[in-house]
């Protein structure tokens, strides 16, 4: 529309004096009338309207002004709001939106191999990113496609030229090589919980992807607490002693660093069959700060109390019943998988991976876990345990112990019933060789199918041992010389050896020789009953044995 009001052209003989003055007055009047008529239309012109009216138009067109947005850009967004809404949802339209708002050209990439299916890359340059960062984020939220994730990918173009040259008929080419150097190193986790001996592999990304040298090293400030093994795109951490270590990852090129905090704590890791989701899987007397992992890598307080005191089960609907699962308990010095009052288990342990802590007592830890058959090497780390009473008692499928279990120095004093009614046929080399404080061996190996035990088994504890009642009772396959088992010259503090070798029909040696090694003994009833393979069985006093005819099977 022509904005200028047309001039009033008078004939030449009237174009002066009062007629001309009247013409000018008429033009002024009608221009004023025109302004009055055009005023309402001017208020809905986005380019010229008042800022307050612009805000109303923006509300009407679903455009919200963001902090720091200039008035000219705000007018532009309101002006093109309708056509931008029409273009939303398609690639070509999305590009037109960016051009209308003077951001410039962009490139859109979908279904890239290195990204997930719902990721759309918007390729821009550094200038666009620094100038229009907030605006582009607004456009993605308002006009981007539903169920899609938009990532901005910055790419700068630089044109280089290759110039041929020659000198004395020699031709060469100059060229450039683009080298990508690491800008960051990012581990999958920045905090890792470990048990002593437990290993965890953590993915490590050196960014950007495709760098020429993606190798890195791992440095540990406290090597005694954990170790690290670096691989291609990962690092494996293995727990050592109890404590916290900082693992620093550093790229070989560029020296970019990241830190993983490794916490080596007390706890346990087992495989078990879940038969009931509301029955206890594990027990503990203190739950403050205790974390669990039910085999899905999600570490947290994902456990609930049960009707049985101190018993805990998985969170509702977390695990499937009837299947085998792996449970790891972190940061607990009291966790066990049984208790003294247990008659039978609903959820039963099949394998022990780790059982670690600085606790002094691990009594009844796996009592009556009848399906337990596999114990990993190095599973038991209990450097301060003094009480192992009924530790694996009545675990009838346990056929062997880890080679390093109780083979070195140990402070244990009480091993009452620790391996009673297990299926142990042999013991690790050096077993109990460092048990210099062992006092109570009541029922220690009772009913085990042991055949041969190492000479000097009970030698280290000769000065502290007091109770041997039923220690080897009903070990009817044991063939070792009893004085090789008790190879020390004297056991001066033993007072109770009743039923010691009851029904051990294959043990050999001299019973009277062993009797003389125990000068303080007061209880010795049926100590050698049924030990008919002893060389001096007939010479053993009746108070130390009972004839087969008189034995009424009083047992323990």
Image (cartoon, rainbow, N blue to C red):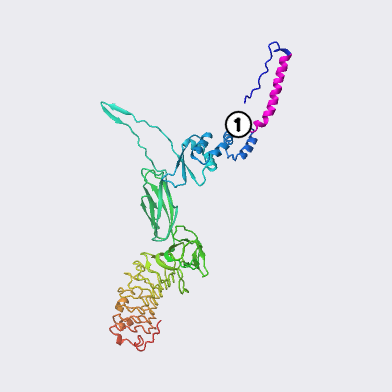
- 88 or 28, which lies in front? 88
The secondary structure type at the circle numbered 1 is: loop
Pinpoint residue 211: horizontal percent, then vertical percent: 38, 43
Residue 517 lies, with reference to residue 46, above or below; the image says below
- 14 or 104, which lies in front? 14
Please indicate whether residue 168 sits to the left or right of residue 433 in the image.
left
Q: Is residue 16 visible?
A: yes
User: Which residue matches tag 1?
Assistant: 47
Q: Quadrant of the C terminus?
A: bottom left
Please indicate whether residue 542 sits to the left or right of residue 186 in the image.
left
Dominant secondary structure, magenta: helix
Please indicate whether residue 154 sits to the left or right of residue 401 in the image.
right
Residue sticking out furthest to the right: 18
Pinpoint residue 547: horizontal percent, then vertical percent: 34, 88
Residue 106 lies, with reference to residue 513, above or below; the image says above
Q: Quadrant of the N terminus?
A: top right
Residue 44, quarter of picture: top right
- 66 or 545, which lies in front? 66
Residue 20, quarter of picture: top right
Task: Examine the structure image and report whether residue 175 is included in the region drawn in magenta.
Answer: no
Q: Which residues are magenta?
A: 18-47
Task: Examine the structure image and report whether residue 45 is included in the region drawn in magenta.
Answer: yes
Q: Is residue 487 visible?
A: no
Pinpoint residue 254: horizontal percent, then vertical percent: 39, 43
Question: Residue drawn 67% across and 32% down?
Answer: 40
Residue 77 lies, with reference to residue 546, above or below; the image says above
Please indicate whether residue 138 sits to the left or right of residue 36 in the image.
left
Residue 28, quarter of picture: top right
Residue sticking out furthest to the top: 13
Pinpoint residue 352: horizontal percent, then vertical percent: 40, 66
Question: Residue drawn 61% across and 33% down?
Answer: 46
Q: Residues within 10 Å of mark 1 (few under 14, many from 20)?
A: some
């Amino acid at each position: 529309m022509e904005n200028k009001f047309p001039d009033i052209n008078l004939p030449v003989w009237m174009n002066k004096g009062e007629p001309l003055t009247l013409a000018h007055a008429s033009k002024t009047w009608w221009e004023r009338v025109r302004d009055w008529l055009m005023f309402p239309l001017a208020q809905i012109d986005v380019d010229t309207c008042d800022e307050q009216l612009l805000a109303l138009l923006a509300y009407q067109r679903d455009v919200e002004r963001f902090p720091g947005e200039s008035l000219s850009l705000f007018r532009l967004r309101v002006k093109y709001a309708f056509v931008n809404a029409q273009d939303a949802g398609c690639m070509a339209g999305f590009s037109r939106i960016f051009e209308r708002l003077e951001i410039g050209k962009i490139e859109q990439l979908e279904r890239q191999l290195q990204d997930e299916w719902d990721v759309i890359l918007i390729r821009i340059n550094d200038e666009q990113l620094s100038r229009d960062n907030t605006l582009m984020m607004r456009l993605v939220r308002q006009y981007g496609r539903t169920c899609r994730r938009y990532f901005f990918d910055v790419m700068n173009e630089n044109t280089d030229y290759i110039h041929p040259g020659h000198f004395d008929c020699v031709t060469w080419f100059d060229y450039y090589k683009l080298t990508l150097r690491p800008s960051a190193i990012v581990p999958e986790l920045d905090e890792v919980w470990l048990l002593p001996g437990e290993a965890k592999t953590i993915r490590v990304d050196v960014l950007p992807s495709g760098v020429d040298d993606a190798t890195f090293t791992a440095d540990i400030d406290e090597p005694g607490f954990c170790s690290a093994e670096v691989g291609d795109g990962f690092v494996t951490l293995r727990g050592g002693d109890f404590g916290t270590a900082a693992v620093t990852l550093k790229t070989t090129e560029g020296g970019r660093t990241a830190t993983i905090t490794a916490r080596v704590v007390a706890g346990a890791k087992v495989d078990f069959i879940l038969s009931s989701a509301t029955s206890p899987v594990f027990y503990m007397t203190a739950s403050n700060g205790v974390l669990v992992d039910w085999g899905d890598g999600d570490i947290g307080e994902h456990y609930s109390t049960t009707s049985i005191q101190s018993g805990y089960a998985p969170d509702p609907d977390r695990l499937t019943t009837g299947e085998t699962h792996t449970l790891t308990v972190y940061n607990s010095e009291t966790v066990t998988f049984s208790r003294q009052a247990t008659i039978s288990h609903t959820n039963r342990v099949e394998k022990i991976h780790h059982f670690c802590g600085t606790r002094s007592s691990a009594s009844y830890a796996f009592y009556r876990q009848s399906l337990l058959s596999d114990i990993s090497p190095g599973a038991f780390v209990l450097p301060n345990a003094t009480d192992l009473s009924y530790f694996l008692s009545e675990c009838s499928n346990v056929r062997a112990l880890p080679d390093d279990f109780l083979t070195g120095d140990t402070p244990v004093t009480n091993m009452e019933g620790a391996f009673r009614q297990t299926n142990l046929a042999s013991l690790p080399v050096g077993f109990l060789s460092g048990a210099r404080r062992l006092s109570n061996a009541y029922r220690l190996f009772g009913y085990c199918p042991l055949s041969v035990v190492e000479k000097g088994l009970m030698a280290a504890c000769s000065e502290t041992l007091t109770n041997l009642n039923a220690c080897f009772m009903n070990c009817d396959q044991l063939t070792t010389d009893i004085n090789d088992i008790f190879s020390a010259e004297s056991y001066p503090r033993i007072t109770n050896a009743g039923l010691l070798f009851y029904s051990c029909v294959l043990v050999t040696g001299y019973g009277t020789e062993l009797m003389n090694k125990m000068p303080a003994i007061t209880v010795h009833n049926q100590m050698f009953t049924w030990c008919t393979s002893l060389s001096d069985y007939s010479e053993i006093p009746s108070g130390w044995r009972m004839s087969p005819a008189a034995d009424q099977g009083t047992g323990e």
